[in-house]
Image (cartoon, rainbow, N blue to C red):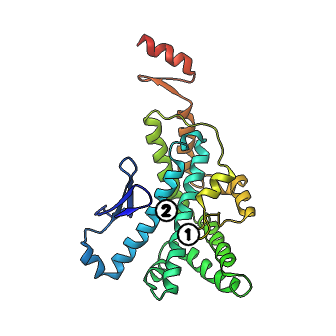
Amino acid sequence: MVILKDWMIEYRDLNDLPYDLDTDRRIIIVHNFGLSKTQLNQSPYFQSQVDLAEIEAIRMARHVEWLNGTIEQYHPEQVLLAGRICVADCQVQKIIHAYNMKLDGQSLLWKYLLCSDISDMVLVFEKMLEKLSLSHDDQDASRQTMTAAFNLWFSNYDRVHQCDHNTLSLMDDMIDDGVTFGAKNISKNILACLTTSPDDQTSYLDRFLQQDILNNPYYRDTKDEYDSIHLMQIISDNKTYRVGDVAFSDQNLAARFAICE
């Protein structure tokens, strides 16, 4: 099945990994629990998980496209922030999609999310939307509730830790492939692009939260001791140039030894 532009989606058994992205071949692979399409259709429990994973994967593929070829320009700490923004946004997309389906009389995805690890985000979204819908137009109420759910994602230690762990592993792989990270910071424009509303293609985050995310250490500081050590090691490795088993802090000196070797 074709989704986005030039992307395909496939279903395979991924050993409980919700989805995977083959960026080279532009393929989204969604975990199907080893079940056929017919078997999935007969199981609301498994089909709900597949549907939600698909929503998240499609949104993440979009983020990959936005950041493709540019992520290495950013400081490793900012890459970590970008990873958090992307994952938090993907959870918001699942919530808004499930809520819209609930309005259409299909509540399976909504019920599943209420029992998931983002249930706190779901409840905040629902309660705020009910309250704001009495005094705001539908679009404004939706944007504010999406903002609230997005912001709440950062309050959960396990969510942030898992996201950081995955991003740190990705940076390790990039350094092993010879990538050297730059020193740029995430800009307001990048943040807006990563959090566009499906309705009007502008960021659903209000300007105050956007500013806070870019300037408040709360959103970018590592909350796990081992993740912090891992990040410091990546920053150190990013400034190190190796020739064989010898590490150099000076690129020109490393190049001279490389010629001798």
> In the image, is residue 131 above or below residue 7?
below
Q: Report the residue at 38% width, 64% height from top.
A: 18
Number of numbered discs visible in the structure rendering? 2
Quadrant where the image shows the N terminus: bottom left
> In the image, is residue 117 above or below residue 2?
below
Query: Mark 2, residues whose alpha carbon is within 10 Å: few (<14), some, or many (≥20)?
Result: many
Q: Where is residue 9 shown, x and y percent of the image?
A: 35, 61
Q: Secondary structure at mark 2?
A: helix
Location of residue 209 by image quarter: bottom right
**Mark 1: which amino acid?**
Val
Of badges 2 and 1, nearer the viewer stands 2
Q: Secondary structure at mark 1?
A: helix
Q: Report the residue at 34% width, 76% height from top.
A: 46
Q: Where is residue 62 shown, x and y percent of the image?
A: 49, 57
N-terminal of the two: label 2 or label 1? Answer: 2
Closer-to-camera residue (35/164) = 35
- Residue under label 1: 92
> In the image, is residue 208 above or below residue 224?
below
- Say left or right for 226 vs 41: right
> In the image, is residue 108 above or below residue 74?
below
- Say left or right for 26 vs 145: left
Closer-to-camera residue (252/196) = 196
**Mark 2: which amino acid?**
Arg
- For marks 2 and 1, give the CA distance: 10 Å
Which label is found at residue 71?
none
- Residue under label 2: 59
Q: Where is residue 158 shown, x and y percent of the image?
A: 52, 63
Q: Report the residue at 62% width, 65% height from top.
A: 155
